[in-house]
Image (cartoon, rainbow, N blue to C red):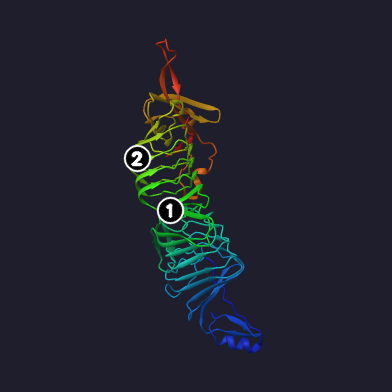
Amino acid sequence: MRKVKKVVLGMTVMSMMMSMAMPMSMPATAIGGLTTVSADVVAQGRCGDKVDYQYDSTTQTLTITGSGATWDNYKISVNNGDVKKIVVGKGITTIGSSLFSKMSYVDDVQIANTVTTIKQDAFAYVNGTITIPTSVKKVETNAFNGARKIVVSGDVKGYEVGAFGGQANYNYDDDYDDWSYADEGNISEICLYGSAENLGKAIYKTSVDSITIAKENKKCRIENGCLTSVDGKQLYYCINSKGKVTIPNSVETISPVAFSSVYLDKLTFGKNVKSVGDFAFVNATIKKLVLNKKLSKIGVKAFYDVSMKKVEFAGKVKMDVAAFEHHVKVVNKKKFKYAQTTLDTALYAKRKVTIKFAKVSGAKGYEVVMKKGKKTYKFTTKKNSFTTAAPKFLKSGYDVDKKYNMDNDEYLQKVSGAVSVKVRPYQFVKKSKKSKKTKKAYGMWSKEMTISHK
């Protein structure tokens, strides 16, 4: 950790002598050409290469001034409970990780419109009202983990998973020589002035009592309990977390994590929904799901850990990795050639591979292909959950660890030297109307999944 640099300023010999009689922590300020020191400022120091802080005990205000970024993993040391207001001044561009993580009784946070990035744990325990300016383009995980009200002046875009708290957060506290833990957060209100593409990601695992749209907001609207873009084409977030929800007919795209952890008796897709984003319904409970005919794409783990046994499609739908789990039966009511499964497990351990994927209605078996470069290994199985001997190209020092979790978009990263697996269902059909002989008729290939080393 960087040491705090004390600041001693003086314009004349007399002022230097006066300042020597005062505590070193009290800063000098220029008033009318003279240099004076405020007796109310009891702490000050440096928290960035060109950034300083000072704490005024009378107003209980901590002010950050200067230009550029503050240091990462630097915790300003002011007694917990003393600070009631934080002001991040004009010129600051990045609020570094953990900067205000020792302060948990702050009522008000003001951030200048020059800040573009707020890093992890920056306001980890601040529990008052926080206004995020329009200039902010990136907010990292747990940047806020205790705020009671968050006002977003700009767009909720570029926000990481758990940006508003709720992610497991362990920090080592130097003062107490111990680890501290921040659990799931609870936000009374989020007020939006712009769009909300990443709102679901930002409040993942966080309890929010109310989401409101400012009168000046021209980018969002609420319909059928759903927060959507103003034209209605993109569904950002489901505000109604219980009961029955019908997605508006105007919606074409469902954003990632839009329905996370909801408990719905019935969910009905509007007639124009075409795509479902990654993790859109993760951890949700949906007793009855009614899809439409236009649905054509479902993202990574879109319905992962959702309590359902069967899903029915009315046409060709491409599903990404783990869109559904292996205990779910996929039914395609149109044609078997459109039938597709989705892998949720592919693990290598002790020279064996464990593979699990969703069942396909009407399938008599499945063709499985493992591939590494130009090397392939094919076999068939009647089971959708099994362990088999690994091919030779998997046995020598394979140590790939590929994760399909939403945190920091790890699931999008490609792994060099990885082995992939894909599956397609098949059934037997007659070669001709008059023939008794049969042949295999295949459904669609699943999206390839990287095999990980357990």
Q: Residue 355's spot in the image, x, y percent? A: 40, 33
Vertical arrangement, residue 345 with respect to residue 379, above or below: below
Number of residues whose C-alpha sits closer than 10 Å to that of mark 1, classed few (under 14), some (14–19) or many (20 or more): many
Residue 86 vertical placement versus 207 (above, below): below
Q: Earlier in the sequence, mark 1 or mark 2?
A: 1
Instruction: Return the residue at label 1.
Output: 204
Whether residues under marks 1 and 2 lie with C-beta atoms below 8 angstroms apart, the answer is no
Measured as percent of width and height from the top left, residue 108 is found at 47, 71
Quarter of the rendering containing residue 286? top left
Measured Cα–Cα span from mark 1 to mark 2: 21 Å
Three-letter amino acid code at the position of disc 1: Tyr
Q: Secondary structure at mark 1?
A: loop
Residue farthest toward the top in the current orientation of the protein? 434
What's the amino acid at mark 2? Met
Which residue is under mark 2? 308
**Residue 282 at what x, y percent from top left?**
41, 46
Kindly state the secondary structure of the residue where label 2 is placed.
loop
Q: Is residue 241 above or below residue 109?
A: above
